Amino acid sequence: MIRPAQVFPPGEYIREELEARGWTQSKLAEILGRPFQTVNAIVNGKKEITPQTAVELGAAFGTSPEFFINLEMAYRLSLVKPPEPAIAERAEALTAGRMVERSGRQGGFVQRSGGGSLLDKSSSDAQVGRPVGRQAAVKGPKSRRGGKEIR
């Protein structure tokens, strides 16, 4: 069985980098122009690295901001649960043309009867937008002046 790569909070990397450079969290806070509490929260994994902080850490450590953003995102992604398998199944079914989107307040998908693309259907097969019942009898709005219908 293949084991996934070890993922760790970005603060651990920062802690190791501080030790290698002989810096303290207080010194890093001073370099960044940030409060000690902010740096401490990042190092201890209690605060996420924002894009702005990534830019500043990159400048302080001589690396790219992307390095810190990637550390942060890899760590955050390792914490989320996997997606429901039904999501991939619905996407595959929709891509394969076996399902069509259902309109309405609840949304969702329904099995499509027949083959081919929705674009292959003639307008007589799909009469979407054609008024029925009471709606068919309703005329357009009336003008304010003569009460005549506006078209």
Image (cartoon, helix red, strand yellow):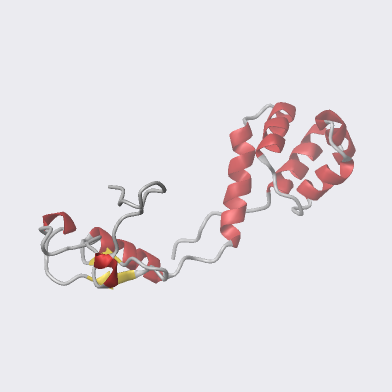
> Which residue extends farthest front?
146
User: So how many labels did they put on this image?
Assistant: 0
Q: Is residue 16 above or below residue 109?
A: above
Residue at position x 12%, y 69% in the image:
114
Q: Quadrant of residue 115?
A: bottom left
Residue at position x 38%, y 71% in the image:
86
Q: From this viewpoint, is residue 65 visible?
A: yes
Say whether residue 86 is left or right of residue 45. left
Image coordinates of residue 53 in percent, x first then y, are 72, 37
Image coordinates of residue 58 in percent, x first then y, are 68, 31
Foreground residue among 119 and 16:
119
Say whether residue 114 is left or right of residue 94. left
Q: Is residue 30 above or below residue 124?
A: above
Q: Is residue 23 above or below residue 2?
A: above
Residue at position x 44%, y 70% in the image:
84
In the rendered image, which quarter contains the N terminus?
Answer: bottom left
Foreground residue among 41 and 150:
150
Q: From this viewpoint, is residue 6 visible?
A: no
Image coordinates of residue 100 in percent, x first then y, are 26, 65
Image coordinates of residue 19 in percent, x first then y, are 80, 39
Say whether residue 103 is left or right of residue 65. left
